[in-house]
Amino acid sequence: MGQQHQPQLRRARLIASVAATVLSLACGTNYVYSAWAPQFAEKLKLSATQSNLIGQFGNLGMYSLGVPVGIFVDRRGPRPFVLVGAFLLAAGYFPLHIAYDRASGSVPVLCFFSFLTGLGSCMAFAAAVKTSALNWPSHRGTATAFPLAAFGLSAFFFSFLGALLFPGDPSAFLRLLSVGTFLLTFVGFFFLRVYPHHNYHAVSNNEARRSSSLSTHLRPPYGQASPRGALSPEEAGTSTTGTITTNVASPPILSDPQPPPNCASSSNKNVDNDIEEDAVDETSSLMSSTASEPVENVVASSVDTDRSHRIDIRGWKLLRSQSFWLLFTIMAILSGVGLMTINNIGNDVNALWKHYDNSVTEDFLVHRQQMHVSILSICSFLGRLLSGVGSDFLVRSLHASRIWCLFVASVVFLIAQVCALNIENPRLLGFVSGLSGLGYGFLFGVFPSLVTEAFGIRGLSQNWGFMTLAPVISSNTFNLLYGQVLDAHSVFDPSGERSCHDGLECYRVAYWATLIACTVGIAFTLWTVQHEQIELARERRKANGED
């Protein structure tokens, strides 16, 4: 494609980014669970532990199958999984809506449908993040921050719509979730595409391997300034590994991809057709046009400007990496802490308000639950956006590690737990929900970029899938602990519904556990910063030795 069509390609990538952001808005609805779970549990006569179990299966669907979903997204491209995700979201939420209307349902069956909502979210969201990372390789932190932020804003979006359109009606709200999540992902599918950069073209596996083997001899140390004009490769698949090569003595030469034999090569072809042609197979290797140059020229001009493109760690190799286990541990600790509050903020609201003012109505409690879900969601959105963009600033301007964003998340979570252990006035509960959302946003806003830089872009989806197994373990532990603590303080009302009127004591023990976990998380974060510095220093010494 000629240089004159770059504005159209940029516009197409922007449209794809908007689509990724919009469909991500449908993928974070597991975090709106607290807005309808207490009423759902009351109507179906469920205990707090059973209610937490249903919510936990939603988290299980979101995180437990991240590895196979990631592998398929890497191999098949992101788009098909958006459609599958759309149908799974509808298939999960609509039966929950029916169960509420009928006031009956088997807990295992309800857990299964909750699992479907999480799995649908996982598939669509993995596709959105992968597309954003591929379309904007030079601004990956910022590009992925928008779908990540929309994911965090999802709970607020649907909670606000529910309060506006169906105030105090959990049945209608569940119907809104089933229809709304399906439509957002289904419509987003038609605009979500990967557009490679104009100086790349799809090459065969043999060419990719040859270029990769040649380029390894001239790799600069990680962190070394790269020549102006050097470009980085992106690929969506896992079938090949290649390294971009550019002539550093002059700006990169822009050449059009070769059209298929059956395509006319007229100079006045429609721009839309150009863009359509450039949206090549999302699982092919993307290489610079200089790959067709003579071998000696390729070797002489080989420059790798991004560590994420010259490493490819996945599978068993990933599991043998100390960096992986450090990041996995941090993810497990902090996500578990955040998910306990996210899934139970509605129970916090009920416990504090019923102790503070026993005359509060059910509609008032529903409104307060939705308000705190909205606070959580907005703060999560801000945290994701700030950590994604801020981590790019740390790396580019301050030459610091992105991992410091995890340290910020750990400290914010620690403050949130201290607030939860001391706030007895329900009017101040916003500090707990706000800080929890902010910490959770900081955590997830920067983590995809950390995974990419540590283990490579080529296996991003499957490596991210491994990383998202971490919340499965920790969130199960913390949520079930919260449910057991709340059940231990709950009594049956004359109406047959379970409730706790002990205020802060209804759940305080659970927050002591998360406070200790946050302290451990801070220690692991500092350890990871030190480990990264040691690893980078080792890489630089190795590179200097090869030179």
Image: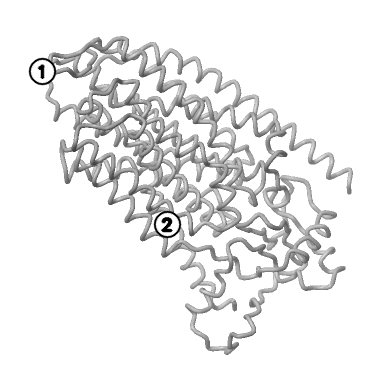
459 and 248: which one is in front? 459
173 and 342: which one is in front? 173
Above or below 459: residue 134: below
Q: Residue at 34% of width from left, 34% of height from top? A: 109
Could you classify mark 1 by the number of other residues whose Cα lies within 10 Å: few (under 14), some (14-19), or many (20 or more)? few
Pointer 1 or 2: first along the chain: 2
345 and 49: which one is in front? 49
Above or below 219: residue 405: above
Res. 83 mark:
2
Q: Quadrant of residue 302?
A: bottom right
Which mark is nearer the camera, 1 or 2?
Answer: 2
Amino acid type shown at disc 2: Leu
In the visual, does 468 lie left or right of 314? Answer: left
Above or below 205: residue 355: above
Q: Residue at 36% of width from left, 37% of height from top? A: 114
Could you classify mark 2 by the number of other residues whose Cα lies within 10 Å: few (under 14), some (14-19), or many (20 or more)? many
Res. 359 mark:
1
Amino acid type shown at disc 1: Ser
**For the image shown, how many numbered marks are present on the structure?**
2
Residue 462, percent from left and from top: 59, 45
